């Protein structure tokens, strides 16, 4: 049996209604204590240690609806860990940065909000 036929056989056995195929964000590890978000897709710096300055990307900002979904799902988990808003980006470039921080602070008051700039 070739690798392709094995792969096809495996893929044919996948249940399309399986929970692991669901786009839902699920947290199952009780040690989960940190969330890193890339709220903008670019940075205005070119630091030697960061790969984000080495390739061009479209300049996009995380939408309010995505931020709301992240918060909603963290609320379901009763999340009290750290939320980092700086994953490979300059978070202060987001036009709604202060509103995002306010949302996290209001709805997840026990979280530690971290940014690096």
Image: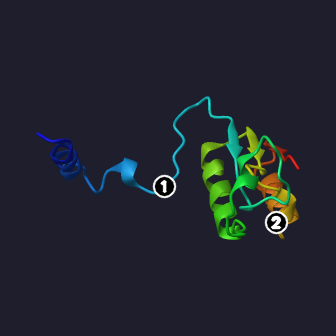
> In the image, is 43 to the left or to the right of 29?
right
Q: Which mark is residue 71?
A: none
Residue sitting farthest toward the top: 31
State the residue at coordinates (68%, 55%).
Answer: 71
> In the image, is 15 to the left or to the right of 56?
left
Residue to which mark 2 is pinned: 94
Q: Who is closer to the viewer here, 15 or 41? A: 41
> In the image, is 44 to the left or to the right of 41?
right
Q: Nearer the viewer, mark 1 or mark 2?
A: 2
Q: Where does the N terminus fall, quadrant-wise?
A: top left
Q: Who is closer to the viewer here, 71 or 49? A: 49
Image position, residue 34 (x, y; %): 69, 38
Is label 2 in a helix, a strand or a loop?
A: loop
Image position, residue 14 (x, y; %): 24, 49
Quarter of the rendering containing residue 79: top right
Residue to which mark 1 is pinned: 24
State the residue at coordinates (75%, 61%).
Answer: 42
Q: Which class describes the residues within 10 Å of circle 2: few (<14), some (14-19), or many (20+)?
A: some
Image position, residue 28 (x, y; %): 51, 37
Is label 1 in a helix, a strand or a loop?
A: loop
């Amino acid at each position: 049996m070739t690798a392709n036929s094995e792969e096809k056989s495996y893929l044919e056995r996948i249940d399309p209604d399986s929970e692991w195929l669901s786009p839902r964000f699920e947290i199952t590890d009780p040690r989960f204590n940190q969330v890193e978000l890339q709220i903008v897709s670019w940075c205005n710096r070119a630091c030697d240690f960061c790969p984000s300055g080495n390739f061009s990307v479209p300049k996009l900002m995380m939408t309010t609806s995505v931020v709301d979904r992240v918060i909603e799902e963290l609320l379901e988990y009763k999340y009290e860990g750290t939320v980092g808003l700086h994953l490979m980006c300059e978070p202060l470039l987001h036009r709604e940065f202060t509103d995002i921080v306010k949302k996290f602070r209001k709805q997840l008051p026990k979280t530690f909000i971290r940014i690096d700039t």
